[in-house]
Amino acid sequence: MLVKTYGSAVYGVDALTITIEVSIVSGTKYYVVGLPDNAVKESMFRVESAITTSGYRMPRQRIVVNLAPADIRKEGSAYDLPIAIGILAASGQIEVDELDKYFIMGELSMDGGLQSIKGALPTSIQARNDHFKGFILPKVNSREAGIVNNVLVYGMENLKEVIDFFNGKNKPEPVIVDTRAEFANQINNYEQDFSDVKGQENIKRALEIAAAGGHNVILIGPPGAGKTMLAKRLPTILPPLNLHEALESTKIYSVAGKLPTANALMTERPFRSPHHTISDVALVGGGMNPQPGEISLAHNGVLFLDELPEFKRTVLEVMRQPLEDRKVSISRARFSVEYPASFMLIASMNPCPCGFFNHPEKECLCGPGIVQKYLSKISGPLLDRIDLHVEVTPVNFTELASSREAEKSSLIRERVMKARAVQDKRFENNDVLHFNAQMSPNMVRQICVIDETGQNLIKRAMEKLGLSARAYDRILKVARTIADLAESENIEPEHLAEAIHYRSLDRESWGG
């Protein structure tokens, strides 16, 4: 008897429908065809043990399982459940009337329990798009899949429950998640706040500008100056995720298997802080079975690279294209996948190996040329892609011991959101652009118009600092953001002067 069940395969952050065909004929062997990987081939042992432990019979005949379409590679252990259900249906132990109406996915334990799977959200979306009635999956993933409307999601604990469901003995209530209520209740639920940081008002100002325009930042300063503390609080002043962004981020975390089981939806902007020993593939994504990298996990949020010069040069260089394109393509011989990677980069570094170059009190112990050599670990093209270069100085004791309450993140966020609203209106006819940092060079010329005084100011700055053409565009973008924060329609000379100040740590002028 031939039986078909349905599941899915995840490619990038989207899923496609897979038909699991099970045929039982005379013979003794078990075959899985349709480009399965080792995890799928090993399913026989898990499936057989789960079926017998659940009190049912594993057929002693030739079982052929085909995963169609056969030219797409199938990966992972989530096909255990649809294969088991197909075998039981083909051997007459399960009613087949409802099988073609449901997506079925789940990894089986030897005792018949269901283990969590990756990509439950994109799979649920695909089930709805293909007009399936419902989606049966492990209970731990049910809330994640339940945020998709117009498809019935059933979370099951074990194989026995799924068998009873199709035999009409058990009809649990479908999992329904009120997406908007879940989103509203948990949005901006951050533990940290900018009011925790004493002093550093100039750095807070720089991060406010960065948040308002979506600009990349590098913080340069001695150890203990507060670079990491400030960076970790950047997500608290970014505008709240909208529902579309939350779903985008949730899909990425679902595919990577990193979505917390308690959360059905990502409600906070991601903050990723990989260690400097990270590999190229772990940062940008890929591998034998492609997975999202850190830059995609930081999509719609912040990627923090602490101790930037300690990262391998190859790791930093592979990040240059995603910083411009805001997406990353992973190409293999048989297929290619694309992951979104629209993130804010915030990097920090010491000014020299000992950490005390330009320190107001401590003396730098580095020899001649060492500072420049240390800075040269970061390539000019990468520095050009970072809009704001900010020097961080240590907080003095008076400010540290002060009882004066610093400005809260919520107040800074209000100003940031007001500036973003101006940008939303500016780019309302463009679906791709959302904030100033995303402007193309052509749009910079149209939108960031400056008067003759401003032209002379930026000309002198470029000549003195030896800035590139890309740095010129960055200055104009930052100046436009500063003007938006000041609610100014035009870019004034003072806005340009502040933007130029944030390029003053370019390699040619700093550490010389």
Image (cartoon, helix red, strand yellow):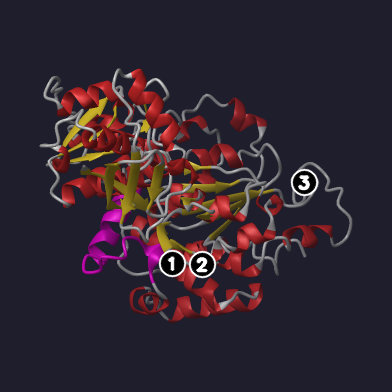
Question: Percent x, y for residue 291?
Answer: 47, 50
Rendered position, 13 above or below 46: below
**Quick check: 128 above or below 261?**
below
Distance from label 1 to label 3 (Cα)?
36 Å
C-beta proximity under 8 Å, tags 1 and 2: yes
Q: Which residue is depicted at the point 75% across and 46% down? A: 359
Q: Which mark is residue 480?
A: none
Image: 194 above or below 326? above
Please tell me which residue is depicted at 17% across the width and 47% down the height of the picture: 128
Residue labelled with disc 1: 325
Label 1 amino acid? Asp
Which residue is the extreme one toward the front? 26
Image quarter (top left, top right, bottom left or bottom right) of the N terminus: top left
Residue topped by disc 3? 356
Q: Earlier in the sequence, mark 1 or mark 3?
A: 1
Residue nearest the observer in this picture, 480 or 77: 77
Q: Which residue is mark 2?
A: 321
